[in-house]
Image (cartoon, rainbow, N blue to C red):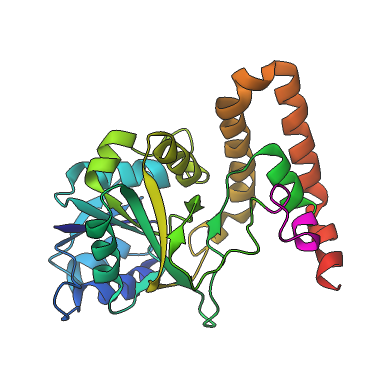
Amino acid sequence: MISALIVNWNTRDFLADCLESLVNRTEPGDAVDEITVVDNASEDDSVEMVRDRYPGVTVISLDRNIGYAAGNNLAAQGARGDLMFFLNPDTVVEPGAVSALSNELAENPKTALVAPKLVLPDGATQASVRGFPTPMALFGAWTALDRLFPAHKVLASYRLPMFDYEKAQTAPQPMASAWMVRRSAWDAVGPFDERFPLFWNDVDWCVRAWEAGWDVTYLPTAVVRHEGGAGTRQIKPRATWESHRSLVEFYRRRYGKRLGPVRLALCIALIMGVGTIRTGWYRLTRRA
């Protein structure tokens, strides 16, 4: 059984397209069995739209915005499927994607989650797979040194510029815009950490999955169209701050004991400082 889980906040029209792509699936084995939408107190009639157009969809309407991580955790609590298909509301699931993802999990019992190819509105493949954000990996990404040395095993290990998006392979941490997760893996690894309400919760979950002995897979034969940022661009300055705050929390939890308080503070200061100049440097390298 496959449960599709969507957390929505003021993205009514995108959500409608996403649901349309899920409910009208006729190919055998390519359908989801239940759909749950958790609505984070939207003010754009999202809830009314779902109830009017898609009466078979379960809607959990909240009176406040509890965030992405908590919203997905709430949806997962009530999901009946042994496979959970986490989707952003600004996605459209292409024909064949559900069956391809579920078959991949059926054939590989050690795989915790499989992520599809994400395609942007202009048809380009989205760079949706990242490595783990070690200090030197982020340094390489935020100074754009990974563009100068795209095959470097350390400096290019976060943005992974050499990742082949046409090849099925293990992937350190794919974006959670579209994830199909095995329920038994979710139960073993645990839910999203709600100390990362908007960003970095997917990174943290993948780290924990790998540490627990599970695999994570990228599958290009499954395609999901992704608008990208439909929710977060509504609160762009706040979202940027939240991303930085969550990164600091990630580093505190992941590297605090290993580095000690002084080295950890210096590491965070370096990363955040480099982050403030990355935009200008990146623009320079784009002209090269």
Seen at 33% across and 71% down, the residue is: 18
The part of the chain drawn in magenta is 145-156
Q: Does the magenta stretch include residue 155?
A: yes
Foreground residue among 25 and 36: 25
Q: What is the magenta segment's predominant secondary structure? A: loop
Seen at 54% across and 70% down, the residue is: 126
Seen at 80% across and 55% down, the residue is: 145
Image quadrant where residue 258 sits: top right
Q: In which quarter of the image is the C terminus?
A: bottom right
The percent position of residue 245, horizontal first and vertical second, equals 61, 37
The mark total stands at 0
Using the image, determine if residue 64 lies above or below residue 269. below
102 sits left or right of 69 in the view: left
Using the image, determine if residue 261 lies above or below residue 211. above
Q: Does the magenta stretch include residue 162?
A: no
Seen at 48% across and 56% down, the residue is: 175
The percent position of residue 15, horizontal first and vertical second, equals 34, 68
235 sits left or right of 88 in the view: right
Q: Can residue 219 be seen in this view?
A: yes
Using the image, determine if residue 176 lies above or below residue 123. above
113 sits left or right of 252 in the view: left
Using the image, determine if residue 194 lies above or below residue 234. above
Foreground residue among 220 and 35: 220
The percent position of residue 252, horizontal first and vertical second, equals 60, 26
Q: Is residue 10 visible?
A: no
Q: Quadrant of the N terminus?
A: bottom left
The percent position of residue 101, horizontal first and vertical second, equals 30, 64
Image quadrant where residue 122 sits: bottom right
